[in-house]
Amino acid sequence: MDKTVVLMIIGMGIVTYLPRMLPLVVLNGKKMPPFLQEVLRNVPFAALGALIIPGIFFINENIWFGVIGAIAAFLVAFMGASVIVVVMSSIAVLTVFSLFL
């Protein structure tokens, strides 16, 4: 391998590691205000929505897969489930839906 490629891989590793490690080190043991805790608790759902919503509108096959999956995910998320439960329940609903097609 070329020396430049190795240096680029090491540099990319450092660049992706630092933003993940620094908040852990800097905020370790510090108490955050309740408002900030609530905002940060909703970040996974916002990121999940930002990743999935475009896929719902630009689905190439049956549009109902996107609509039904989004409705199932929204309902489960609205009930207060964790992100993994939301994703798994949406997959389960779409699996059952695909059996009837």
Image (cartoon, rainbow, N blue to C red):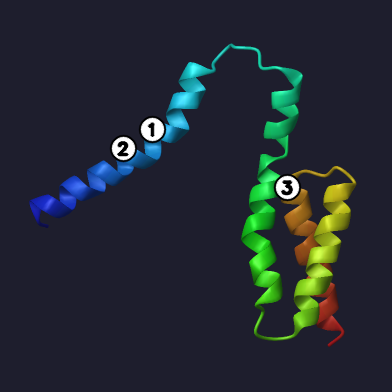
Are the residues at dot 1 and dot 3 in contact (C-beta closer than 8 Å)? no
For the point 79% across and 62% down, the residue is 90
Q: Nearer the viewer, residue 34 or 16?
A: 34
Are the residues at dot 2 and dot 1 in contact (C-beta closer than 8 Å)? yes
Secondary structure state at the residue bearing disc 2: helix
Residue at image mark 2: 14
Where is residue 98, by image quadrant? bottom right
In the rendered image, the vertical position of residue 86 relative to residue 71, given as above or below: above
Amino acid carrying mark 2 in the image = Ile
Amino acid carrying mark 3 in the image = Val
Amino acid carrying mark 1 in the image = Leu
Q: Nearer the viewer, mark 1 or mark 3?
A: 1
Secondary structure state at the residue bearing disc 1: helix
Where is residue 97, by image quadrant? bottom right
Q: Nearer the viewer, residue 75 or 54?
A: 54
Residue 84: % across, % down: 72, 49
User: From the viewer's perspective, is 85 left or right of 3?
Assistant: right
- Neighbor class of circle 2 (other Cα within 10 Å; few <14, some 14-19, many 20+) is few
Secondary structure state at the residue bearing disc 3: helix
Residue at image mark 3: 83
User: From the viewer's perspective, is 66 left or right of 93?
Assistant: left
Where is residue 56, by image quadrant? bottom right
- Quadrant for the N terminus, please: bottom left
For the point 72% across and 39% down, the residue is 42
Residue at image mark 1: 18
